[in-house]
Image (cartoon, rainbow, N blue to C red):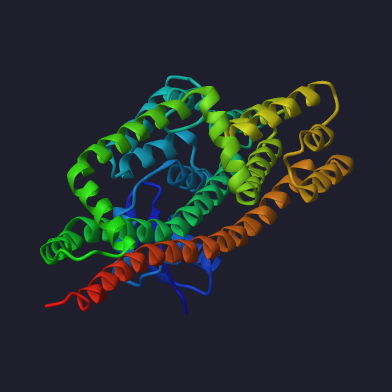
Amino acid sequence: MPIFAYRSTTMEGIVAEGVIEAADEKSAIERLKNTGVIPLEVRAPREGGIRAKLRLKTRRLDPATFTAELSALLGAGLPLDRSLNILAEISDRREMKEVVQSLLKSVREGGSFSDALQKHPEAFPRLYVNMVRAGEAGGFLDVILERLNEFLESSKELKEHVFSAMIYPTILFITGGLSIILILTFVLPRFSVIFAELGSSLPLSTQILLVVSDALKSYGWILFILIVAAGFVFKNYISTGRGKYQWDALKLRLMGDVIIKLETARFCRTLGTLLASGVSLLQALNNAREVISNQVIASAIEMVSKGAKEGKGIAVPLSQSGIFPPLALSMIKVGEETGQLDQMLIRIAVTYEKSLRQAIKRFMGFLEPALILIMGLIIGFIVISVLLAIFSITEIPF
C-alpha cells in the first residue's frame, strides 16, 4: 500500500508530521480526519519513510502552502482569526511568520482579510487579493481558498515542468562550453610550442585553431568583459517597454508553439478561476492580463478588454487578435453560448497544459541533439586539426 507523508495540526495548534499508509491521497486525508486531527498537507513522497519527513520539514513555505493550510483549517470549521493564529504558531520561517502575524493583527482590528493581504504585495499578488475579496463578498471564503490552492498548485507544477526540462540542456551547454575553452586555452598552447620548434608548415585548419587559441589566451579577459557588458546592456534594454516588446516578439517567432500554448493555458486558467470565484469579467480580464509574461500577447489581451467593454464578449475580440489557437477560440465561443465560460476556460487550460508538456518534450528532443551536434562538431574540428598537424610532422625531413 502506498505511503503518504503528512503534516497535520489539532484544534489547539499542535503540529505533527509523519507518514501514513493509504490506498490514495483522499483515503489518507480521511484516515487522518478520523483520528481527530486537521490534515494540512498530504502528498505521496518520492522518498519513503524518514526521508519524506525530513523533506517536509525543510521545504520552504510559500503562498501555495499558506493557502492550502488555511483552506484546510477553515474547512474544518475554525474561524479565520483562529486559523491564522495557528498558522502563525506553526510557521517555521521567520518571514512567513511575520506576514501571518500581520494578517492576524489586521483581521482582529476589524479589517477585512483581503485588505490585510493587500498590505503584502510581495507575497500575495493582486490576482490573489481579488479572488479573496470576491470570496468574502459572497460568503464562501473557504471555497475560494480551495480554488486558489488548485490554481497555485497547477501553476507551480507547470513552472517546475518547464524548469526541469531546461536543466539538462543548460548543463550540457555549460559543460561543453567550458570543455572547449579548456582545450583552447590549456591544451592547444602545449602543441603550439612543439609545432613552432619544428618549424613546419601547418594545415590551414590548425593555423586557424592556433590563432583562435592565442587570441583567447591573450585577450580572453577582454572578451569576458565585453560579454558581461553586452549582457548588462541587453538586460537594461529588455527592461524597457520597447525592448521587452521586441524581445518577446523575437521569442514568439523562435518558439511560437511553446509560448502560445504556455500563455493560453496560463490566461485561461487564471480567467476561469476568477470568473468561477465571482469576479466580474472586466476585472478578471485585467487580472488575467497581468499573468501574461509575453508583451505581444498581453497587448492582444488589452484589445480583448476593450471589446468586452463594448459588449462583444471575449471570443470575437480574441479571434480578431490572431494570437490564440483555433481550438481555444472555438471552446471559448461554446462556453459563452452555453453560459459556462468559467468551466470551459478551465478545460482549455487543462488541455493546453497537457499539450504544452508534449510541445516542450518535442522542443527538448530537438534542442538536446542540436547542442550535442554543435559541441561535437567544434570538438571534432579541434581534434582533426591537431591530428592533421601531427601527421604533417611525419613529412618533415630529418
The image position of residue 372, as x and y in percent, is 43, 66
Left or right: where does residue 272 sit relative to residue 195?
right
Residue lying at the far front of the rendered structure: 397
Residue pictured at 79% horizontal, 21% vertical: 309
Query: Residue 366 versus residue 83: which sits nearer the camera?
Result: 366
Q: Would you identify the image quadrant in which residue 333 lies?
A: top right
The residue under the point 47% across, 20% down is 110
Q: Is residue 133 at all visible to an observer of this figure?
A: yes
Tell me where residue 350 appears, x and y as whole percent: 67, 54
The answer to whether residue 292 is seen in the rendering is: no
**Left or right: residue 225 compared with residue 65:** left
Using the image, determine if residue 220 lies above or below residue 31. Answer: above
Using the image, determine if residue 346 lies above or below residue 28: above
What residue is at 48 percent from the left and 47 percent from the top?
68
Q: How many marks?
A: 0
Between 117 and 16, the one nearer to me in the picture: 117
Tell me: 313 left or right of 41: right
Q: 221 and 238: which one is in front?
A: 221
**Rendered view: 114 above or below 381:** above
Q: Is residue 284 left or right of residue 190?
A: right
Question: Which quarter of the figure has residue 317?
Answer: top right
> In the picture, which quadrant includes the C terminus?
bottom left
Q: Position of residue 23 (x, y in %)?
A: 53, 74
Give whichever of 54, 368 is nearer the camera.
Answer: 368
Residue at the far right in the pictured view: 337
Q: Is residue 71 above or below residue 81?
A: below
Query: Percent x, y for residue 182?
Result: 22, 58
